[in-house]
Image: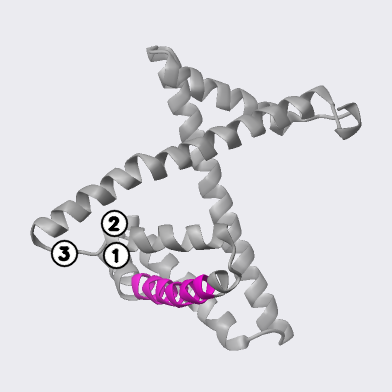
Amino acid sequence: MRRPTLTALVVIVGLLLIADLLVVNSALGQLAGIVVDAAILVAAGAALAGVGALGARRIADLWRRRGDPVAATFVLVGIGVMLVAGLRPGSSGTGDPAVQWLIAALLVPIGASLFGLLFVTTLGAARRSLAMRSREATLLVAAAFVTTILLVPLSGEVGAWLSGVAGWSLAVPIGAVFRGLLIGIGLLTAVYAARTLLGMGAADD
């Protein structure tokens, strides 16, 4: 006997949020707000559990002398520094100047470096895609090239025109594609949840 409690909970919460979006009701809005706050708390707890598991794994790596000890040490030091800066007596949490400095001085440059590497790897992937001579790859690279040109920061009338076209492209065609993908994913999730609740498998098709 299946007990798809989690699936049923996801379906109920999704229907509640959809109803709150479509129906103007103060009580329904308050209930939806409580559900969203609870989801945020659950996500925060999951993030803390993930950080704890990562720290425990790196401590075990150092204790058993496996993996990269330098990387494990840096991970543990980074976790400890951020925890001390955010939880020390008198700290204001995420808005504390020490936390803000650590983010600006460490996390932002690290993220910029990763995006720089991503740009190089993306160029390599585009070159390999064009070498395949497939129509889909050519269309994808061409769309990426046009989007990059539109987002180039230029001044004057040309820059204003490019900015307007870029905003329209992101809001209308690209936004429509993303909305279609989200709607399709939502419908597939609802169908899969209904099949799970009803106990239907591939053999029942």
Q: Residue at x 14, y 53 (%)?
A: 160
Q: Residue at x 42, y 57 (%)?
A: 143
Q: Quickly name the residue at label 2.
A: 95
- Main SS of residues in magenta: helix
Residue 194 visible in this rendered orientation of the protein = yes
In the rendered structure, find residue 149 and report the number of the disc placed on it: none
Q: Quickly name the residue at label 1.
A: 100
Q: Say which label, 3 or 1, has the lower sequence index.
A: 1
60 vs 139, left or right, is: right
Q: Position of residue 52 (x, y in %)?
A: 59, 62
Q: Say which label, 3 or 2, has the lower sequence index.
A: 2
Range drawn in magenta? 107-127
In the rendered structure, find residue 154 and report the number of the disc placed on it: 3
Whether pointer 2 and pointer 1 mark residues with C-beta atoms closer than 8 Å, the reply is yes
**Secondary structure beneath disc 2?**
helix
When asked about the image quadrant of residue 154, the answer is bottom left
The amino acid marked with disc number 1 is Gln
16 vs 173, left or right, is: right
**Secondary structure beneath disc 3?**
loop
Q: Position of residue 129 (x, y in %)?
A: 56, 69
3D distance between C-alphas at marks 2 and 1: 7 Å
**Secondary structure beneath disc 1?**
helix
Which residue appears farthest toward the left when viewing the image? Answer: 156
